[in-house]
Amino acid sequence: MNLSGLQNLNLSTNKLDGHIPWNIGKLSSLESLDLSDNELSGSIPFSISDLNFLSHLNLSFNHLSGRIPKGNQLQTLDDKSIYIGNDGLCGPPLNNCSDDADVLPKGHEKGGTTRKDDSEMVWFYGGMGMGFAAGFVGVCSILYFNDSWRCAWFGLVDRVYNKLWVTIAIKANQVKRKFLRNKLEGNA
C-alpha cells in the first residue's frame, strides 16, 4: 500500500483470498482497480472512498459482504455490475442494508490489521534484520582481515569527521558574530 503513485491495478482472476487491505486508500493516485473473480471476503474497507481519482472499479464475483462505503469518487461509480456476484453486499447502488451490515469483521476495522498481515510483517522485519546483520558482519570481517582497506576506511572516516567539524565550527562562529553584530546595532 506504499505505492502512492500507482494508477492502475488489475489483480482479477488470480484466486486471491483474504480481505481487501483496510489501508487501500493510501494508493492515492489509483484510477483503475480490478479485483474481480477472486476469493476475497469480508467487507469493502472504508478507506476506498479516499481514492479521489478512481474512475474504474470492479469487485465482482468475490465473497464480499457488508455495506458498500459512500463518499467522494465512489458516488459516481453507480453501476451495479461493479458488485455483482457478492451476495452479502448491500447499500447504494444495490439493495438497502439491514442494521447488522455495518459491523465489520474482526481485525478489519479502520486502523486495525489482521493476523495474516501481522505475521507477514514479522517475517519482513525478521528477514530485514538478518540481512542487515549479515551485511554488517561481512563489512566488519573485510575491514578486520584486510589492512589496506581498514586504513583507507578509517582515513576516510577521519577526513569526513574533520571536514564536518570545521564546517560546523565556522557556521557556529558566523551565527555568533551575526547575533553579536545585531545586538550591538540594536543598542546603538
Image (cartoon, helix red, strand yellow):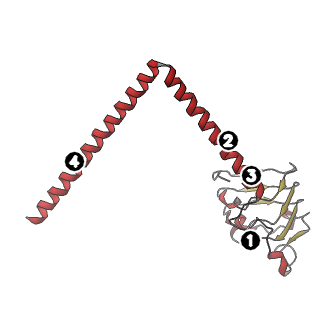
In the picture of the structure, the residue carrying the numbered disc 4 is 173
User: What element does badge 2 sit on?
Assistant: helix
Q: Where is 27 relative to 137, above or below?
A: below
Crowding at dot 4, Cα within 10 Å, few <14 / some 14-19 / many 20+, comes out as: few
Number of on-image labels = 4
Q: Position of residue 22 (x, y in %)?
A: 73, 62
Real-space Cα distance between discs 1 and 2?
A: 42 Å
Name the residue furthest bottom.
Answer: 99
Query: 13 left or right of 53?
Result: right
Q: Earlier in the sequence, mark 1 or mark 2?
A: 1
Q: Are marks 1 and 2 in contact (CB under 8 Å)?
A: no
Q: Amino acid at mark 3?
A: Ser
In the picture of the structure, the residue carrying the numbered disc 1 is 75
Real-space Cα distance between discs 2 and 4?
A: 46 Å
Q: Are marks 2 and 3 in contact (CB under 8 Å)?
A: no
Crowding at dot 1, Cα within 10 Å, few <14 / some 14-19 / many 20+, comes out as: few
Q: Nearer the viewer, residue 3 or 151?
A: 151
* Tag nearer the camera, 2 or 4: 2
Q: Amino acid at mark 4?
A: Asn
Q: Earlier in the sequence, mark 4 or mark 1?
A: 1
Residue drawn at x 71%, y 46% is 123
Q: Earlier in the sequence, mark 2 or mark 3?
A: 3
* Tag nearer the camera, 4 or 3: 3
Quarter of the image where the C terminus is located: bottom left
* Tag nearer the camera, 4 or 1: 4
Q: Position of residue 117 (x, y in %)?
A: 74, 55
In the picture of the structure, the residue carrying the numbered disc 3 is 119
Q: Amino acid at mark 2?
A: Gly
In the picture of the structure, the residue carrying the numbered disc 2 is 127
